[in-house]
Image (spheres, rainbow, N blue to C red):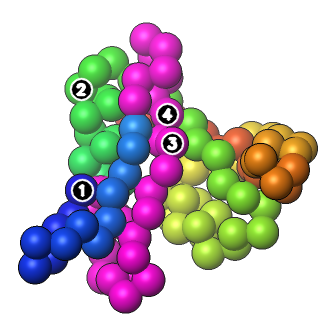
């Protein structure tokens, strides 16, 4: 979680899905605080914590139409693995992305 002036401006939710697989459920940064490396630092922490708990890879889902998020994750080493049709409640599609940890 990132806090500025006692207000939460960003958070990440991640967990150990299986013994060797971490899962990033969501990363949210308030629009006024984007492009300040907050998301980058939250991802760093989450990835390191998952690595410490034995994850060899991390998966996440990202909306097909969210190209900004896709580029963000790709810069962090995540690769698209497959299309998840009607993944979201509104029946929109997502990509499953994965990063292999060193």
Q: Can residue 99 be seen at all in this image of the molecule? A: no
Q: Looking at this view, is 31 or 76 the one in front?
A: 31
Q: Nearer the observer, disc 1 or disc 4? A: 1
Q: Nearer the observer, disc 3 or disc 4? A: 3
Instruction: Identify the residue shown where x is 66% and y is 54%.
Output: 62
Give the residue pinned by disc 4.
23
Against 69, is 59 above or below? above
Disc 2 secondary structure class: helix
First in sequence, mark 1 or 4: give its number: 1
- Mark 3 Cα-neighbour bin, 10 Å: few <14, some 14–19, many ≥20: few
> What is the CA distance from the residue labelled 1 to the residue labelled 4?
17 Å
Which region is colored magenta?
Answer: 15-42
Mark 4 in CB contact with mark 2 (< 8 angstroms): no
Mark 3 in CB contact with mark 4 (< 8 angstroms): yes
First in sequence, mark 3 or 2: give its number: 3
Disc 1 secondary structure class: loop
Disc 4 secondary structure class: strand
Give the residue pinned by disc 2.
52
Instruction: Identify the residue shown where x is 25% and y is 48%.
Output: 45
Give the residue pinned by disc 1.
1
First in sequence, mark 1 or 3: give its number: 1
For residue 37, side relative to residue 24 (left or right) = left
> What is the CA distance from the residue labelled 1 to the residue labelled 2?
19 Å
Q: Percent from the top left, x then y, of residue 74?
A: 58, 60
Instruction: Identify the residue shown where x is 76% and y is 48%.
Output: 88
The C terminus lies in which quarter of the figure? top left
Q: Nearer the observer, disc 3 or disc 2? A: 3
Disc 3 secondary structure class: strand
For residue 88, side relative to residue 7 (left or right) = right
> What is the CA distance from the residue labelled 3 to the residue labelled 4?
6 Å
Mark 1 in CB contact with mark 2 (< 8 angstroms): no
């Amino acid at each position: 979680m990132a806090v500025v002036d006692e207000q939460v401006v960003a958070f990440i939710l991640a967990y150990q899905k299986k013994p060797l697989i971490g899962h990033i459920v969501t990363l949210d940064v308030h629009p006024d605080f984007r492009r300040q490396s907050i998301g980058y630092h939250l991802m760093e922490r989450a990835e390191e914590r998952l690595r410490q708990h034995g994850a060899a890879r991390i998966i996440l889902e990202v909306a097909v139409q969210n190209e900004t998020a896709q580029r963000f994750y790709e810069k962090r080493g995540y690769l698209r693995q497959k299309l998840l049709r009607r993944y979201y409640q509104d029946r929109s599609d997502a990509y499953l992305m994965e990063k292999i940890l060193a």
